[in-house]
Structure formats: structure tokens, C-alpha cells
Amino acid sequence: MGLGVGIFLVAIGAVLAFAVKVNPTGGALDIHTIGWILLGVGALGIVLSMVFWSSWAGPGRYTRRTTSVGPGGETRTTTIDQP
């Protein structure tokens, strides 16, 4: 789940939890509870997205590794980190 999906779930959950008026006639689903569940799942998704974003160094960073074999069979690995 990405940051956008988390924000979307929080928005839908907030609408269902706070803005929808339901007539309590004993229906099988409680819309307000579903809204609170979506709020929680969306908030958890946002937090996890931020945690993993920082561990992966965010967008625009990549590492390029090249391995070359020289004369005599010796190998050399070069690593280039691009911010």
C-alpha cells in the first residue's frame, strides 16, 4: 500500500465515520465502525509507507554495480551510488 492509497483510505474512513448519518434500524453493517476501521488501516498504511520510504532512500536514488574481468582472470567490482 502506498502513500496515496493510505491517504485515500483515511479520507473515505473519515467521511464514513463523521459525515454519514445512518438510521439505526438494526442493519447488518455499522457504517461508522467501517469508517473507523478504514481510518486505522489508512493511518497504518501511511506510517508503514513512510518507514519503508526512508529505508529505501526514497525516489531518485539508485546504485549501479559493474563487474569487470581483467587479464589473468582477476575480477573487479565497482559500485556507484547516485543520490
Image (tube, rainbow, N blue to C red):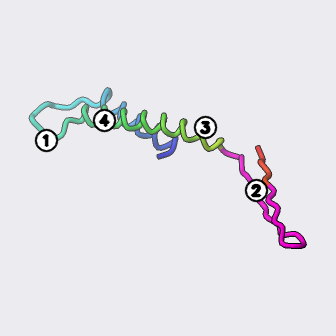
The kind of residue on which mark 1 rests is: Ala
x, y percentage for residue 44?
42, 35
The kind of residue on which mark 4 rests is: Ile
Q: Earlier in the sequence, mark 1 or mark 4?
A: 1
Which mark's residue is nearer the viewer, 3 or 4? 3
Q: Earlier in the sequence, mark 2 or mark 1?
A: 1
x, y percentage for residue 38?
34, 37
What's the mark number on residue 28? 1
Residue matched to label 2: 64
Q: Secondary structure at mark 3?
A: helix
The residue depicted at 24 percent of the width and 29 percent of the height is 21
Residue in the foreground of this view, choosing between 81 and 46:
81
x, y percentage for residue 28?
13, 41
Q: Which residues are magenta?
A: 59-78
Which mark's residue is nearer the viewer, 1 or 4? 4
Dominant secondary structure (helix, strand or loop) of the stretch shown in magenta? strand
Badge 2 vs badge 1, beta-carbon distance below 8 Å = no
What's the mark number on residue 54? 3
Residue matched to label 4: 37
